[in-house]
Image (tube, coloured by chain):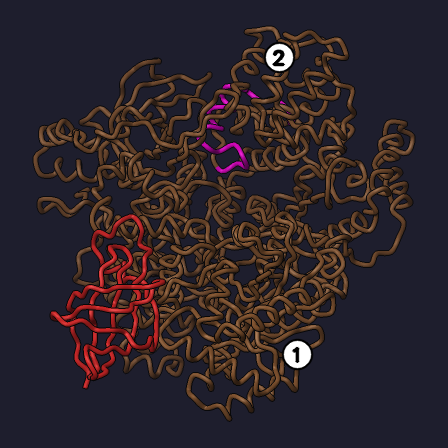
């Protein structure tokens, strides 16, 4: 039976087309009993290949197609356990030798790792090249050199290209003359004939050239997984019938010798943990005492249960390792919190991995660790984002570079990236490609044509015609292909010194050793992955706490804050939670307004309710009704009351699903957890339903109760939230709100420095204004690298000073020099000593950093930088005595910048309107139109139709119950946020403007959503900058005419508003395929290059 | 001497291989196939390619003779519409 020994999958980046499972399935369908995967320069797909082969019942062969420089390539295959270790180490060595991203092997490297490897020399090898050049003596010498270092075979490849058959025959003759085995390969790049256009686009994308025959590696379309019959015909065509049989037999023999066993050879049948010292039971017993639980019978019972599971699974070293890692990170003074289901384990609490007592918060171990859960449990640690790499270094120091690695992940083609690469390959002009790509929201590549049909902002674009149709069609075929390997944002692999025998390692961009395995591979290989997540809010809070201490506010210990601080919860209930962890989005501000939280437990529920699951299965309304006493809590059965009491009868948490299943079936929590996991998939859900109904009926529950409970469980489906996770989130939510309420300046300094939230920084800055925190301008003598707190006057409110890091283009070195050389007496003095680049100095001048030194206008200072930077002067910079040459900046003859120009410069350089809010320039127009401001909206009546305006600061398309794509937009109008929802019925006329404009005027109907919260149902919107142009040109009449004229283009609306591919769940709820994706158009977090709309001779606001 | 043509020709095949063809009114018998290769279409140059960008072109370089003189001829086959063309001649 035939076998393919040379096969690239999509994990040969920008080369292979098929995923490993597709290749294995195809090989199996062709009747093959084995299949090799030999990806280029890496083993990124190896584990997936071994797993896919196991599913297909065929034998896996693994190797690599290695670059030897200058386009020369060989294939190496691994034999047995020794071969696998050699292969891992050889790939690692090739990456090490070539430097990051440029792996290169050599014959010497192969020689150093030859044990168990077989080298295949094909057309791209030095031997194959000599044969192509008709230099048989050179070819023979090179072949001999390879044989001297490793087991070697000649690989015959014939893709039916011009001259290939003759070349193949000469290769065979060489092998026969030298007595080296010859095998047949097909250098496969895709599974099926017909996939070659994708391979050709990848050739062009990889080489950054347009599609052209001479650049392509595949010009015959024959690099597919050929059938045994096709392989025989190819062999006959180049080598003749007799030789063909021998060639195929030799190929099969080599395949049999190289077949690997996942358990025996790759070690996938066991776990490979670091060596640990200590006894888990003893450490836990000590923990009981430390946590004051030594007398608790509940704790003792729970601990015994957990330790028993851990012992049965042999995971004691795992817990000791994680405890050790968490202690290491905390020892460096890095804020570290446990997240996720691990918070539900008492062992984790006792070992000090987490600080949440699972018994007190009703958290279950089984969601995290149970006999029914396969594999290693997951423990996630949250650390300060700014110090995440420092935490990594601590782990590498402790476990050694040989036993530690970060985990990799593949960035894959999505709509925008696919359109960019295909567009470039077919030779579209770059600016056109850019415009087309940005017209798409962040959808999957395979959704491109569906999106063109479904989304109003794209239907109107007229993109779907002519040559672009070809681009879109091919771009869709790139869907999901890996295009770039990156370091996983949080995974760290902790193992022992044998790690390098089990995993190839390359260097990440950040300089860490990085395994070529992704998080799934790591698990399959029995390796321990610790997730260390960088959380910006942790950094923001650490910064705030440091600022409080620095400015004499004392030591705030966030872990020891008083619980239930009334002013903090009062602020949360008012919805003024911008900048706070988890509760700043428009939807969350609305929900906290309705839910009116008073305790941490309320926040836990609030965070859990604001998820697609609860929203999808309509848990929010009954919960709120019961909470506010509008309805009695309803329990499907009295037996379920203990499990559901905390959430008024509504299922909110995973833990409750476990308890409900256990209560009705008596199966125990471990099996209940297995059932919960099965709920996620359609077939699993059906299985669980049958079992659940039977078991519950056997225990005497009636059909109606069973049906009702099942409806809720099914709706919960794949969604829902782990309570342990929500509890771990609620703590920083409360801490951040406490800081905002009691130390606003320090809070904003932290948030502006570490940018943890969803809004542009300028919105946070405006929020600071509303909380009475003075904004202090950029100043070369006062600004620090980061935002800091600065008292404005003796005893007065503290302000926040704009950070030097905000200046566009400034480097860390420049910031360091500016701070080190302070104070400065003048601009020339600054220029002499701070030695920043000219553009940075110009930016500083325009952003007002010298206003404190000079009365002169910013325009004069800007010009002065130009004079200082003239070549003649630059040469003597640093040699002149200070005080010489123009210490004084003469008052210039240039007109001062207008306030409009100043704000434009601030937005351009800092991304922030520091001196005043950008919307204030439109005040006259907004007043004339009768626009309602955010601060006045709480006074509006339900159902009122109002005009609102503002800078667009967020657009979201979250999953909502109806399955519509609703566009939620937040405008910032200098008095607060205005939240609007645009439904599908108005998107034909609104979507393009909504996504394409920076400042907006909108009309909407008021919808009251709680005591104070107000949202608007959007009906129409206009680009405010455009209207302002009309205002300047023709006054209010012109503006009203423009507003009336803005009508949808009816032709484009004909496709109708119903998107294809709306996902309808078994529970009857629907989900738009465009829910929760990044929107079309430019990034909302950046202001446009041109602020004021140039129209009819107007040059921006005249204020 | 090489000459380049793009003339349509009628070709008789056997087992996929050309055995006879008619060019400019004369019948040529294929004596020997010197080489056979395939290429993909330049689908990216086609402004409105059909749904399948796949599909290949086949080339046969053959020794053939209308009478006693033997020349080398290159035949191009497009399997999509089963058309043949004489692309080059060495004589």
| Magenta segment includes A591 | yes
Provide the secondary structure element on which disc 2 rests: helix
- For residue A1093, what is the image quadrant? top left
Q: Which mark is residue A844?
A: none
- A4 left or right, relative to A833: right
Query: Camera-side residue: B19 or A729?
Result: B19
Q: Position of residue B63 (x, y in %)?
A: 28, 78
In primary-sequence order, the first of circles 1 and 2 is: 1
Image quarter hosting the N terminus of chain A: bottom right
- Does the rendering let one see residue A1031? yes
Marks 1 and 2 belong to one chain: yes
- Check the picture and name the quadrant holding the C terminus of chain A: top left
* In front of the other: A1068 or A1023: A1068
Which residue is denoted by mark 2 in the rendering?
Answer: A707
Magenta stretch bounds: A579-600
State the image coordinates of residue A93 (x, y, percent, origin top left).
Answer: 62, 74
Chain with colour brown in the figure: A
Q: Which one of the lettered chains is coloured red?
A: B
Q: Is residue A696 left or right of residue A898?
A: right
Residue furthest to the bottom: A137
Q: Position of residue A464 (x, y in %)?
A: 24, 44
Question: Residue at 22% of width from left, 78% of height from top?
Answer: B65
In this rendering, would A534 be left or right of A724? Answer: left
Q: Disc 1: which chain?
A: A
Quarter location, residue B27: bottom left
Residue at image mark 1: A151
User: Dot 1: within a 10 Å radius of its alpha carbon, few (fewer than 14), some, or many (20 or more) residues?
Assistant: some
Horizontal side, residue A662 vs residue A1053: left or right: right
Question: Secondary structure beneath disc 1?
Answer: strand
Number of numbered discs overlaid on the protein picture: 2
């Amino acid at each position: 039976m035939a076998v393919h020994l040379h096969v690239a999958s999509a994990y040969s980046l920008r080369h292979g087309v098929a995923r490993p499972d597709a290749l294995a399935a195809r090989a199996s369908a062709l009747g093959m009993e084995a299949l090799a995967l030999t990806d280029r320069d890496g083993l990124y797909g190896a584990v997936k290949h071994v797993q896919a082969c196991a599913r297909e019942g065929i034998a896996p062969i693994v190797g690599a197609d290695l670059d030897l420089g200058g386009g020369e390539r060989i294939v190496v295959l691994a034999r047995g356990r020794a071969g696998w270790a050699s292969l891992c180490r050889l790939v690692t060595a090739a990456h090490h030798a070539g430097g990051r991203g440029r792996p290169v092997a050599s014959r010497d490297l192969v020689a150093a790792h030859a044990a168990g490897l077989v080298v295949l020399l094909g057309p791209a090898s030095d031997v194959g090249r000599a044969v192509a050049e008709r230099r048989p003596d050179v070819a023979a010498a090179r072949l001999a050199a390879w044989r001297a270092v490793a087991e070697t075979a000649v690989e015959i490849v014939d893709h039916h290209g011009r001259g290939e058959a003759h070349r193949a025959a000469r290769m065979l003759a060489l092998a026969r003359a030298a007595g080296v085995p010859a095998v047949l390969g097909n250098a496969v790049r895709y599974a099926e004939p017909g996939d070659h256009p994708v391979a050709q686009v990848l050739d062009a994308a990889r080489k950054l050239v347009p599609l052209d025959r001479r650049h392509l590696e595949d010009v015959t379309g024959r690099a597919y997984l050929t059938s045994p019959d096709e392989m025989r015909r190819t062999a006959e065509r180049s080598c003749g019938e007799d030789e063909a049989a021998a060639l195929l037999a030799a190929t099969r023999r080599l395949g049999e010798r190289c077949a690997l066993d996942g358990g025996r050879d790759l070690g996938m049948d066991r776990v490979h943990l670091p060596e640990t010292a200590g006894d888990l039971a003893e450490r836990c017993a000590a923990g009981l005492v430390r946590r004051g639980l030594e007398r608790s019978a509940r704790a003792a019972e729970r601990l015994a249960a957990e330790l028993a599971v851990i012992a049965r699974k042999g995971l004691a070293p795992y817990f000791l390792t994680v405890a050790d890692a968490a202690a290491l990170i905390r020892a460096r003074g890095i804020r570290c919190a446990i997240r996720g289901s691990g918070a539900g384990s008492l062992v984790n609490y006792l070992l000090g991995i987490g600080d949440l007592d699972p018994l007190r918060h009703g958290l279950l171990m089984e969601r995290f660790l149970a006999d029914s859960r396969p594999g290693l449990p997951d423990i996630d640690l949250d650390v300060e984002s700014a110090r995440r790499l420092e935490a990594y270094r601590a782990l590498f120091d402790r476990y050694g570079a040989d036993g530690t690695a970060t985990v990799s992940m593949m960035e894959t083609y999505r709509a925008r990236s696919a359109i960019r690469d295909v567009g470039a390959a077919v030779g579209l002009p770059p600016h056109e490609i850019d415009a087309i790509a940005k017209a798409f929201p962040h959808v999957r590549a395979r959704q491109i044509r569906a999106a063109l049909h479904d989304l109003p902002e794209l239907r109107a674009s007229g993109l779907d015609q002519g040559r672009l149709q070809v681009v879109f069609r091919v771009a869709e075929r790139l869907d999901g292909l890996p295009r770039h390997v990156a370091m996983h944002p949080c995974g760290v692999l902790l193992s022992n010194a044998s790690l390098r025998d089990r995993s190839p390692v390359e260097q990440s961009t950040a300089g860490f050793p990085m395994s070529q395995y992704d998080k799934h591979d790591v698990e399959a290989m029995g390796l321990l992955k610790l997730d260390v997540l960088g959380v910006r809010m942790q950094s923001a809070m650490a910064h705030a706490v440091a600022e409080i201490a620095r400015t004499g506010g004392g030591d705030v210990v966030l872990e020891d804050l008083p619980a239930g601080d009334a002013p903090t919860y009062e602020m949360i209930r008012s919805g003024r939670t911008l900048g706070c962890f988890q509760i700043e989005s428009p939807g969350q501000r609305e929900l906290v307004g309705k839910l009116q939280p008073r305790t941490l437990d309320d926040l836990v529920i609030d965070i859990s309710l604001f998820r697609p699951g609860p929203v999808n299965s309509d848990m929010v309304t009954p919960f709120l009704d019961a909470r506010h006493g509008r309805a009695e809590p309803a329990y499907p059965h009295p037996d379920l009351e203990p499990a559901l009491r905390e959430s008024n009868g509504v299922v909110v948490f995973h833990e409750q699903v476990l308890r409900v299943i256990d209560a009705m079936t008596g199966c125990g929590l471990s099996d209940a957890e297995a059932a919960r996991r099965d709920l996620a998939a359609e077939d699993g859900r059906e299985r669980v339903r049958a079992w659940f109904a039977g078991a519950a009926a056997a225990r005497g529950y009636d059909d109606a109760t069973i049906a009702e409970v099942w409806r809720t469980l099914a709706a919960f489906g794949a969604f829902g939230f782990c309570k342990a996770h929500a509890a771990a989130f609620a703590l920083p939510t409360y801490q951040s709100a406490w800081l905002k309420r009691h130390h606003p300046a320090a809070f904003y300094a932290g948030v502006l420095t570490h940018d943890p939230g969803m809004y542009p920084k300028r919105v946070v800055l405006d929020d600071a204004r509303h909380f009475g925190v003075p904004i202090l301008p950029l100043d070369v003598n006062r600004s620090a690298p980061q935002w800091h707190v600065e008292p404005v006057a003796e005893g007065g409110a503290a302000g926040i000073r704009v950070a030097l890091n905000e200046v566009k283009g400034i480097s860390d070195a420049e910031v360091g020099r500016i701070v080190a050389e302070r104070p400065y007496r003048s601009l020339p003095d600054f220029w002499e000593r701070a030695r920043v680049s000219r553009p940075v100095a110009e930016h500083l001048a325009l952003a007002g950093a010298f206003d404190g030194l000079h009365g002169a206008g910013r325009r004069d200072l800007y010009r002065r930088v130009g004079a200082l930077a003239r070549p003649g002067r630059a040469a003597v910079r640093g040699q002149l005595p200070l005080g010489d040459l123009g210490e004084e900046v003469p008052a210039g003859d240039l007109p001062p910048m207008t306030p409009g120009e100043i704000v434009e410069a601030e937005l351009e350089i800092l991304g922030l309107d520091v001196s005043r809010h950008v919307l204030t320039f439109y005040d006259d127009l907004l007043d004339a139109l009768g626009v309602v401001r955010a601060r006045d909206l709480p006074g509006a009546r339900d159902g009122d139709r109002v005009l609102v305006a503002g800078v667009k600061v967020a657009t979201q398309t979250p999953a909502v119950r109806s399955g519509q794509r609703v566009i939620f937009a937040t405008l910032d109008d200098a008095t607060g946020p205005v939240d609007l929802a645009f439904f599908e019925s108005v998107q034909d006329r609104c979507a393009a403007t909504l996504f394409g404009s920076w400042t907006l005027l909108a009309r909407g109907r008021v919808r009251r959503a709680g005591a104070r919260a107000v949202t608007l149902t959007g009906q129409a919107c206009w680009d405010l900058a455009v209207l302002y142009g009309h205002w300047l040109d023709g006054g209010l009449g012109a503006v009203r005419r423009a507003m009336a004229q803005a009508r949808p283009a009816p032709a484009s609306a004909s496709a109708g508003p119903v998107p294809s591919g709306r996902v309808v769940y078994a529970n009857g709820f629907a989900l738009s395929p465009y829910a929760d994706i990044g929107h079309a158009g430019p990034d909302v977090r950046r202001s446009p290059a041109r602020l004021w709309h140039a129209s009819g001779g107007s040059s921006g606001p005249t204020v | 001497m090489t000459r380049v043509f793009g003339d349509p020709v009628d070709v008789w095949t056997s087992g996929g291989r050309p055995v006879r063809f008619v060019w400019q009114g004369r019948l040529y018998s294929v004596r020997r196939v010197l080489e056979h290769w395939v290429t993909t279409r330049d689908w990216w140059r086609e402004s409105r390619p059909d749904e399948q960008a796949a599909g290949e072109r086949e080339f046969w370089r053959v020794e053939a003779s209308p009478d006693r003189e033997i020349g080398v001829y290159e035949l191009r086959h497009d399997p999509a519409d089963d058309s043949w063309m004489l692309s080059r001649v060495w004589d």
